[in-house]
Amino acid sequence: MLIFEIGSDGRNATAQFEEPADVNDIPTHHLRQGAAGLPEVSELQVVRHFTNLSKKNFSIDGQFYPLGSCTMKYNPRGAHRAASLPGFLNRHPLAPERFSQGFMACLYELQEYLKDVTGMQAVSLTPMAGAQGEFAGVAMIKAYHDSQADIVRSEILIPSAAHGTNPATAVMCGYTVREISVTNEGDVDIEELKLAVGPQTAGLMMTNPSTCGVFDRRIQEIADIVHGAGGLLYYDGANLNAILGKVKPGDMGFDVLHMNLHKTFATPHGGGGPGSGPVGVNDKLSPFVPTPVVGQRDDGSYFWSDRDQLPLSIGRLSTFMGNAGILLRAYAYARLLGREGMNRVGEYATLNANYMATRLEQAGFQLAYPDRRATHEFIVTLAKEAKELGVNAMDFAKRLLDYGYHAPTTYFPLLIAECLLIEPTETESREEIDGFVNAMISILEEAHRTPEILKAAPHTMPVKRLDDVKAARDLDLAFKGDAN
Amino acid sequence: MPFVPHTETDERAMLEAIGVTSIEALFDEIPAQLRNGQLVETPSGLSEMSMLRLMSERANQDVIGLSFLGGGAYDHHIPSAVWDLASRGEFLTAYTPYQAEASQGTLQLIYEFQTMMCRLTAMDVSNASVYDGATAMAEAILMAVRANKKSKSKRLLCAGNIHPHYLEACRSIVSNQNIELEVIPYRDDTGTLDLDYLETRHGEDFAAMVVGYPNFFGGLEDLDHVTDWAHGGGMLLVGVVNPMALGILSPPGEWGETGADIVVGEAQPFGIPIASGGPYLGYMCCKKAIVRQMPGRIIGRTIDLDGREGFALTLQAREQHIRRAKATSNICTNQGLLVTAASIYLSLLGDRGIYAVASRSHANTIALVDKLTAIPGVRLRFDGPVFHEAVVQLPAPAQTILHKVAEAGILGGYDLGLVDEGLSDCMLCCATETKTDEDLSALATALSQAIGAHSADI
């Protein structure tokens, strides 16, 4: 039932608002002429409706959620509580600096930690998600070339395994996109890259470890090739969890990067967001970082560094200061882990992924890159099962739901047929990983014995597979029935 | 180890299964000279108790007694149920509903949100959110350029009295695509758009016109006239609308002859704390005819194999994970949790509740203006109707007076000199339904004293 279908005319959660006031000084033509048709329900009905809706979700709190490239690790409750302290929740974004020093201290220190994590010289926290961080990064690359009066650079190079946000971002920044192939070992094709670079090259966007779940071993050579052609190197931090405490992107030769705090810094994903995508840059790009940034005066007090201090900035990217509450959660997480804890993140994320990959391979699953070391994630390809048994990656994914596991990322990266991209994260126990592997083994047996069980899966969810074609053809995007 | 569950026994057994002797060996493909990523500057870890103590001290540093700040972030009462429910782990720790069968809770909730936003705005379609109000406006600008097939222009007319931060963010975001925003000036007497100026641009090719409702000064434009004027010139009309205002004000879908084409804005007033500016909730609605140019996630209602009602992501061929370089936007992660909060908020309020909150916020602001303008030398800067903000002109620089008012523990308003030198003796004040008569009087008293003290200083 929709919330609109459980109400009744005149019913309301009346404790939640006071009596209306007269509106007699606004001319009639400005006024709403009839009620909008919002739900008319009691407070208990609201509580019960949304509680019951929540029960239809898989979540990290409820299930193992090995969604590759999304780093679905435990979101510490303490970080949530810290960011929800009344002093933080009630601080108005336009409050003067002298009433903001506590908040700004957290942000300033977070900037410093993120420099330490990435090996970069400057950080701006304002981008509100990974994709906006990418935008900021590529816009800075453009601003840099413009500042050098180097206006012929029109092209961004992107490996074919990249996230879809990379090419979409390059286009939003006014660039054309040229894809570079990935070798059958999962590395960027160096020979193709050498041929592709030239005076038109603005930069290369790249994830390392890549979405293939392997570390690109020739990264320094790649950096030299791109720099040699006058381009800059952009690091997509989607997979930063793999190397946290092990390798710094700045050391690999990257000029600019974004981090996904909702991934690496364990802030909750919220059913689709909010995220947070701070950017880090080296000295070359530091004049261009998006505003505002928190600065510190000699007396230890903090100030907003805005256009006045950063005249070459690419500018503001949000109404105020990005997803401030997510930044506070990330700060709390960094304080809880400290440097020792963060140094362990990449290690145990990598241990879990390699253990899981080994066990699955031993159970008869085909790894996409069997000769490579897994990073924090790895790819299983079910091409053989699809061909021989008629069950595909989607069937495995749906059947996993019946076993109580959220499915891994399916059909990404696009260049691997019938793939599952699996990322266990460091916060999962050996027992949980074993449980997932055992479920995969059971499903494989089912695929041999009773493939129809997979084809029709899931069987235990609130709904069976949905008619996506109908959804797109007979568009029903808002309820048209009566409000009650 | 915080949040890492491995015992020594686990670690040994796992390494043995893999066939290596140390975790370090798992990094053997990374060139040795790169393997020095240990954090050094970051301090050592804290227990949860110590971390919370530190952050409580920081949070308490910023507490202020009473605030009349608005300017794009509004302090409304948030029913207790909103965040009690939104903080349930099933909402908080899920992700984008890629596996629809295991995400029907989030999917149905977004469908209900889309319905509520369509009904409030009187538009056909809503998406599942973008980041915030400013980026919603930027996406609307990009969308309008794509959607207006009649115009070849990459220029738009943009109201000069829209939130200056919105304008700045939009310029940052759209300028790389050579899209130009030409600012329509506002009238000095009313703060509303200069309609005579509009006539001077008659006949020029613009993709769209962007207007704020209410405008940055809280004022109300004649949107029936403006909408028809824009449409008459072949432009799309983009409304940047505080959705709380739609509790009492006419919905954009009903402006002029045929209504606005794209409606966007900041839905923070719907149950989301002001919290230093985010995370907030950018919303986007449009007419059905241009839905395929909409960025972001959209949820559709459909049926499952058994014919049961269900919900799924739809029209995904617009999005970056399918269309890559040809997508309508690069947006991926959005503001899902805030959609959850807003949907719960609107369900609790209903039509009567949103009318009550909007009308009381309006009435409180009018009452505040009456109290403040009774102080000698204080006047209302602009004529004309407002929603729940107003510009108050002071007999001295706003910065100086507000500083003195703050000494009484009150943030009296926003110093407009920060965004417009010509308004440096003005402050933007907002009194939502959360303010009592005593609160309003407290500001009036503090302001009166501050002005008195300032006069005595000079």
Image (cartoon, coloured by chain):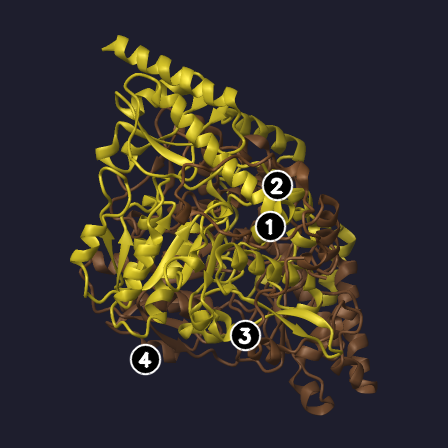
Chain colours: A brown, B yellow
SS at badge 2? helix
Residue found 70% across the figure and 74% down from its top: A397
Q: Chain of mark 1?
A: A
Observer-side mark, 1 or 4, equals 1
> In front: B120, or A113?
B120
The image shows residue B20, relative to residue A307, as above or below, that is below
Residue A193's spot in the image, x, y percent?
A: 36, 76
First along the sequence among labels 3 and 2: 2
Q: CA distance from mark 2 to mark 4?
A: 48 Å
Q: Amino acid at mark 3?
A: Pro
Q: Chain of mark 2?
A: A
Left or right for B457, reference A433: left
Labels 3, 4: one chain: yes
- Asked whether the viewer can see residue A223, the reply is no
Q: Residues within 10 Å of mark 4 (few under 14, many from 20)?
A: few
The answer to whether the residue labelled 2 contacts the one labelled 1, judged by CB atoms less than 8 Å apart, is yes
Q: CA distance from mark 2 to mark 1?
A: 9 Å
Residue located farthest toward the left when viewing the structure as drawn: B200
The numbered mark at residue A79 is 2
Q: Which residue is mark 4?
A: A195
Labels 2, 1: one chain: yes
First along the sequence among labels 1 and 4: 4
Q: Which residue is mark 1?
A: A266
First along the sequence among labels 2 and 4: 2
First along the sequence among labels 2 and 1: 2
Q: Which residue is mark 3?
A: A413
Q: Chain of mark 3?
A: A
Q: CA distance from mark 1 to mark 4?
A: 40 Å
The image shows residue B185, relative to residue B431, as above or below, that is below
